[in-house]
Each structure stands twice: as structure tokens, then as C-alpha cells.
């Protein structure tokens, strides 16, 4: 039995009195691409942010590669990790947001080498070599010295992906990575993600791109109202949904 890369057990999340996640159970295996679908406000992005402890879960257990996220267990009690320990774990998880969040005063290369040199203490020469290879991998070998303001949205998002990959993560999280892009720029970002999936990267992707979920996803999860309504392989969930709520949602978006 392989250890799941992500394992959520009865995960709850409250913001004040508002319960956003209502007992999520989910496993993502190493090398798997899991696509989270659902309407706005269904809890998808919150769940994604809980995986790397950007949000603290209120109840339940959440582990990455067999280790609890943000906590350690002693006996039957959980103790929250210190921020430094949490940050070290978070460094193993890459995350790409809707907005590119690039440092505007740094070139594409500068953005990609920042974390490896500061967090991983990689030598600058090695970080530059790795960054150039990553920028080539995402199709931006000619944009090494360009600043974010000189790049299109799609190019900025590809730099953001390269920046996440520079930390050599074991898991990549994507929170609607194409939703802020003009339609003609969506394909270039999805192509990079397809390449990562082909290379065996474990990915959890919150997306509205149904074609991507169908073609690339190993598992599709439909969430609504803070719960997992339906999950399975793409053909089953997208093309032959069983739950009325899934059918209604897909009827509107397909």
C-alpha cells in the first residue's frame, strides 16, 4: 500500500460561525491529478488552502505524504507546529494562485530564484541554472530578463508555475490558475500543467476547465456546500454524473 500524498479525514473548517468545510474525506495518491469542481462558495479553494496550512482546519485530520499538516500528534492529542516548522513543510508543497503574485520589481529569473536561495539556501549559481531550465520548460526561455509588467497574463502565470517548481515540491496545488486570464491565454497555461501531469507530478487542481479535468484528471471531485457530493474518474463524474446536484451544475457549465 502506498501512502496517499493527500489524506483528508472528516475535515471541518469554520470562519467564525460559518461552516465552510463540513467533513471532507478525500485521498489523492502519488502521481495522481485530482480536479476539484463546484460552484463558487462550495469550499474548494478553502480546502486547497488547508492542504498547505494557509488556513487551519477546525476539526478532523489532514496529512501530506503521511505527515500531519500543521500539527504533530502526541498520544491522542494534536499540537500545532511552530510557524518555522510549518513553513519548512509548506516548502515541499507548490501553490499557484488565480493571481500571479509575482514580485513586480524582479525579473522572471529573479522571481524563480528567490525562494530556493532564501529558503533552501541553494547557491545562486545553481539556482540560476535550475531557474533557466524551468523557464525553458514552461516555454519562457526568452523572457528570463523580463519584468512582470512586460509579460502577458499567461506568461506571468507560467513564471508563477516555474517559481513553484523551483522548490522541487512533492505536491502542486492550483487554485483556478486560468480564471484571471483572457480566453486565448488559457491554453498555454493548461499545456504546461498537462506536461507536469505527464511527468508524474501529484496535483490538486481547482478548475472550471472541464476539458482539462476530463483529459488530464485521474479523479474528479464535485464539491458543493462544503461537502464532497460525488467523486470518481472523469468519465464517470463529468459524462455520467449520478447525483442530481452534479447533474444540475454540469448542465449549466458544459
Image: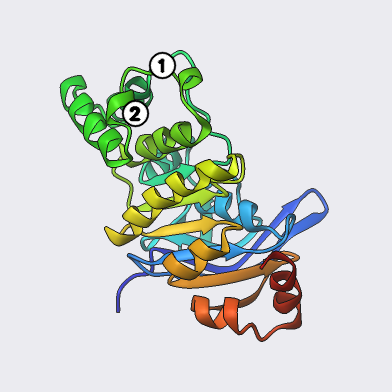
Residue 79 in the image: state x and y as whole percent.
Answer: 52, 51
Q: Is residue 109 left or right of residue 47?
A: left
Is 250 above or below relative to 176?
A: below
Q: Nearer the viewer, residue 65 or 67?
A: 65
Q: Residue furthest right?
A: 17
The quarter of the rendered structure image containing the N terminus is: bottom left
Q: SS of the residue at dot 1?
A: loop
- Mark 1 or mark 2, earlier in chain: 1
Colour scheme employed for the rendering of this structure: rainbow
Q: Is residue 142 left or right of residue 4?
A: left
Image quadrant assignment for residue 84: top left
Residue 44 in the image: state x and y as whole percent.
Answer: 63, 58
Q: SS of the residue at dot 2?
A: helix
Q: Residue furthest top?
A: 105
At x 22% / y 27%, what residue is drawn?
127
Q: Residues within 10 Å of mark 1 (few under 14, many from 20)?
A: some
At x 40% / y 33%, what residue is drawn?
159
Is 31 above or below relative to 116?
A: below
Q: Judge whether residue 24 can be spotted in this image.
A: no
Residue 66 in the image: state x and y as whole percent.
Answer: 37, 63
The quarter of the rendered structure image containing the C terminus is: bottom right
Q: Is residue 106 left or right of residue 241?
A: left
Determine which of the numbered discs, if any, sits on residue 112 in the image.
2
Q: Residues within 10 Å of mark 2 (few under 14, many from 20)?
A: many
The residues bearing labels 1 and 2 have C-alpha atoms spaced at a distance of 9 Å
Residue 26 in the image: state x and y as whole percent.
Answer: 53, 71
Which residue is disc 1 drawn over?
A: 106
Q: Nearer the viewer, residue 108 or 7?
A: 108
Amino acid at each position: 500500500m502506498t501512502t496517499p500524498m493527500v489524506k483528508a479525514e472528516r475535515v471541518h473548517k469554520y470562519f467564525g460561525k460559518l461552516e465552510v468545510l463540513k467533513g471532507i474525506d478525500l485521498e489523492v495518491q502519488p502521481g495522481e491529478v485530482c480536479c476539484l469542481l463546484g460552484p463558487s462558495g462550495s469550499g474548494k479553494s478553502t480546502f486547497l488552502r488547508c492542504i498547505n496550512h494557509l488556513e487551519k482546519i477546525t476539526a478532523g485530520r489532514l496529512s501530506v505524504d503521511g505527515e500531519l499538516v500543521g500539527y504533530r500528534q502526541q498520544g491522542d492529542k494534536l499540537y500545532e507546529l511552530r510557524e518555522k516548522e510549518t513553513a519548512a513543510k509548506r516548502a515541499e508543497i507548490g501553490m499557484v494562485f488565480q493571481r500571479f503574485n509575482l514580485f513586480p520589481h524582479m525579473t522572471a529569473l529573479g522571481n524563480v530564484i528567490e525562494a530556493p536561495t532564501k529558503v533552501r539556501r541553494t547557491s545562486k549559481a545553481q539556482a540560476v541554472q535550475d531557474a533557466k531550465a524551468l523557464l525553458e520548460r514552461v516555454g519562457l526561455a526568452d523572457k528570463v530578463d523580463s519584468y512582470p509588467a512586460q509579460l502577458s497574463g499567461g506568461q506571468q502565470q507560467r513564471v508563477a508555475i516555474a517559481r513553484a517548481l523551483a522548490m522541487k515540491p512533492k505536491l502542486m496545488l492550483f487554485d483556478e490558475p486560468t480564471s484571471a486570464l483572457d480566453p486565448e491565454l488559457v491554453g498555454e497555461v493548461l499545456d504546461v500543467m498537462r506536461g507536469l501531469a505527464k511527468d508524474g507530478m501529484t496535483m490538486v487542481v481547482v478548475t472550471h476547465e472541464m476539458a482539462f479535468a476530463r483529459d488530464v484528471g485521474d479523479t474528479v471531485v464535485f464539491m458543493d456546500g462544503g461537502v464532497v457530493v460525488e467523486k470518481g474518474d472523469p468519465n464517470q463524474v463529468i459524462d455520467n454524473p449520478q447525483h442530481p446536484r452534479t447533474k444540475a451544475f454540469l448542465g449549466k457549465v458544459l
